[in-house]
Each structure stands twice: as C-alpha cells, then as structure tokens.
Amino acid sequence: MNICIPHRILSTLILLVLCTQQTLAFTTGTDFNERTSNDSTEQLVIENNVQAPQLSNHYRAPYEMNLGAVFSEDEQISLRLQDSVTSLISALLDGIISEDHFTKQEQSTHSFFYKALRNLGAASDQHQLAPLVLKSYSPDDGKTHLITIAFMKSKGQSNQIYRIIEFHAYPHDDKFLFKSPFEYNTRNLTAHQLGSVQYHLSKPLDISRAQEFVDFKDMFESLVDLPSTPLDYYCFETLDNLLRAHGIIYDCTKCNWLKEDLGFTDNNSRSFLTGKGDERYIFEYLVDFMADHCDDNADLYPPFVYGIATYFGDYGLSGDDMPTLKAQFRNKLIEDPNTNFLVEFQKGRKSSVNRHFSFYVISAFLCEEVVKKHGMQAMLKLAHSGRDGELFLNTLEKLLGVDKDGFHALIERLITT
C-alpha cells in the first residue's frame, strides 16, 4: 500500500528517523546465516510523488539545508563549512573518497566508516536527490562541528533515504576536513587494560570472559609465530550502538543484513569491534585474524576457517557451543534419517541446521578431531586447502584416513562423542 506524505512534513520524517531510539540498523531475530557481502536493496521509502529536493543547476550547492539548520552562528565559519561540505558532497556523489576531505591516516583507522560512504551516488536506474543537511552543531565552542547529512535517491515514484551519516568537521588551513565522529562518540567509554588487550565499554567488564579472550589471542598469535600485539577491543552492547558510534545513523544496506557488524577488525588489525556486548567474541576476531596474519592466506578455505572460529569461539550470533551444536545435528538425523552429511557439506549456504550453516558447523566437528589427533599445525594445514577447497577432502583423508565414502559416518561418530 502506498502512503502519501505531504512535502511539508518530509524533513520532519527524516528527523524522526534520525532521533528515534528504536534500532534502525538491524532487525532483531536476524541470524548469522543471513550475512552477505552484497548490499541489501531494502531502503526507507517515502512513497508517491513527494517533491524531495533534487539536484538542479539553479542550486549553488549540491545539497539542501533542513528547516532551521545552519552550519554555524559565526558567519565566517559558516561560509567555510558551506564551501567544504559542498566539495565533500560533490566528491562523494561522484564516488570519490580522497585526501581533499579525509586524511590517509583517518581512512586507515576507521575503514569501516569509509565503506559506508561508498555508492552514495545514484545508480543507472535511480535519480539523484539533493542530500539534506539535517543539523550541524559544535560540541566544543566552535572548534569543530558535527554535521548530519541524509543521502537520498528516487526510483520510479518513490523517494528513498539511502544513508544518514554524521561527519566530524575540523579546521585545516583555510577549509574544513572531515572524519568519523568515532573518537568523539566513544570518549566516555571506560578503558580496562588486561594483558595485551585494552577494553573499551560502557558496562562493567566481565573479567572472566575478557581473560579467556586475552589468553586465546596470545595462544593463537604464538601459533602463527607472531609476537603478542596490543589490541583495542571496543565492546558495544548493540549493533545499533556500534553503527552510531561511527556516525552511521541509518544505512539501508544494514536493516536486515548483519554483514560484518557482529565483529570486525579495523585500524590495520590494531582494533577489534563488536556489537554483541561480549568481551569474548572470538568467532569474528579469529576469522579476520587468520585472513590478516596467516601465511598464504589466499589459500585459506573459508568454510573451514569459520569452522575453526566456531570450535574456539562458538557459533556467530547464537553463541551455541560445540555440545549444543552436536545435539542439534543429532536431532537432525532423528528428524531425517536419510540425511547425508557429505551432501549437506557440499551444499554450502544452501544447507543449515537450526539456522546455522551446515558446512561451518561440520568443519568445526572436523577441526576438533584434527586438533585432538594431530595438533594445531595440522589444523592450519587443513585450513590451507585452497579458496575453493580443492585440496580439502584429500588433506582430510591424509589426516584422518577418511575418504568421501566415509565422510558421513565420521561426522555421525563425531556428534555422538
């Protein structure tokens, strides 16, 4: 059903999106098996002939100001901000992220934020609407400014809010440069040093879980012959908090798709961030760690890497541990005695048990057995089975003496022990 919204309340609607206390960044109940590398097409849609501001040669700047919004009460600062924001928006709509607006160091430190600045321009089947500057205010008596901008597109008869981004503007020479507001938004988090890890969080630290993570990190670094490296661990209690800390107020590609927001490394692997509120979120940390630090990482077989992560860190969003996962797979056999675990493994993302990808969990069972019989180095050898797993079954046969014909029976044995 199409809903008609008068033009006079368009800006008010966007502000409601901006200010709402509800979580717009993700939908609860979404599980890890909905992760994807592709952008969701779901967008916040304003239907039917709403005359949102559109780009036109008559406009001096490629954006509109929201009702009552000004860059600064100081006229000179306001003019400098206007020029800088004009240049910024023009570049972003052209798909350009450059040192004219963001330093290289800033782009490296908060690469997650800069991924959200991609694809802000209209696609071939869309019409570009002029971005709307929702608000601008200074948190430090005019030294810097936090500027919130809604990026919009239209397709057919609907106008769509694509992203709402907050930028932190700071003076540089005769203009303003921009950065993620992450440092400002996380300034009140409490820091706790535990070994090589410094935790940043708003709740009391669970020392027991944190120590488990630190011990695991030190062990795995030693396994791949790396020295213990300092790590900043940002533990946000919700995915929405994680996004907003970066300045991502709304992103249509993150409404129903978790993507990497459960946990990811940033700042060249110097920091790890999670929106699960868990001081021991090994699962995503290990996946990124292996991709960043394992030799010949181009040969890593992703399903088995996720299996290793599950074995050491439990499964993704659900947090189900190995005994729980084994029970789920035993129930699968009871419900469907004709299940063949090799067939399920080879289905990839098309097979799941309790909304857990079968090939990840089966890999976790295999990981446990390989570690038990041959140790960690054998586990790493099996992980390096080729990007498409072309060596996986042959290596598995060498390690466990099981070929394709015995694969199902092996898994059936592993889930009952």
Image (tube, rainbow, N blue to C red):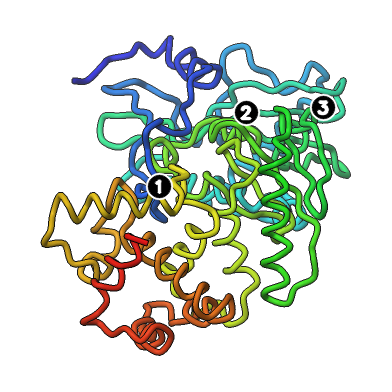
Image position of 359 (left or right of 109): left
Q: Is residue 6 visible?
A: yes
Q: Label 2 vs label 3: CA separation?
A: 17 Å
Among the two numbered marks 1 and 2 on one chain, the one whose residue lies closer to the N terminus: 1
Vertical comparison of 285 with 199: above or below: below
Q: Position of residue 230 (x, y in %)?
A: 80, 57
Image position of 22 (left or right of 139): left
Helix, strand or loop for disc 3: helix
Image position of 121 (left or right of 169): left
Judging by the rendered image, the residue that carries numbered circle 3 is: 77
Q: Position of residue 179 (x, y in %)?
A: 72, 42
Among the two numbered marks 2 and 3 on one chain, the one whose residue lies closer to the N terminus: 3
Closer-to-camera residue (97/223):
223
Judging by the rendered image, the residue that carries numbered circle 1 is: 32
Are the residues tagged 2 and 3 within 8 Å (C-beta)?
Answer: no
Q: Label 3 vs label 1: CA separation?
A: 46 Å
Is disc 3 surrounded by few (<14), some (14 to 19) or many (20+) residues within 10 Å?
some
Q: Position of residue 412 (x, y in %)?
A: 27, 65
Judging by the rendered image, the residue that carries numbered circle 2 is: 148
Q: Position of residue 213 (x, y in %)?
A: 67, 51
Identify the amino acid type marked 1: Phe
Identify the amino acid type marked 2: Thr
Closer-to-camera residue (302/261):
302
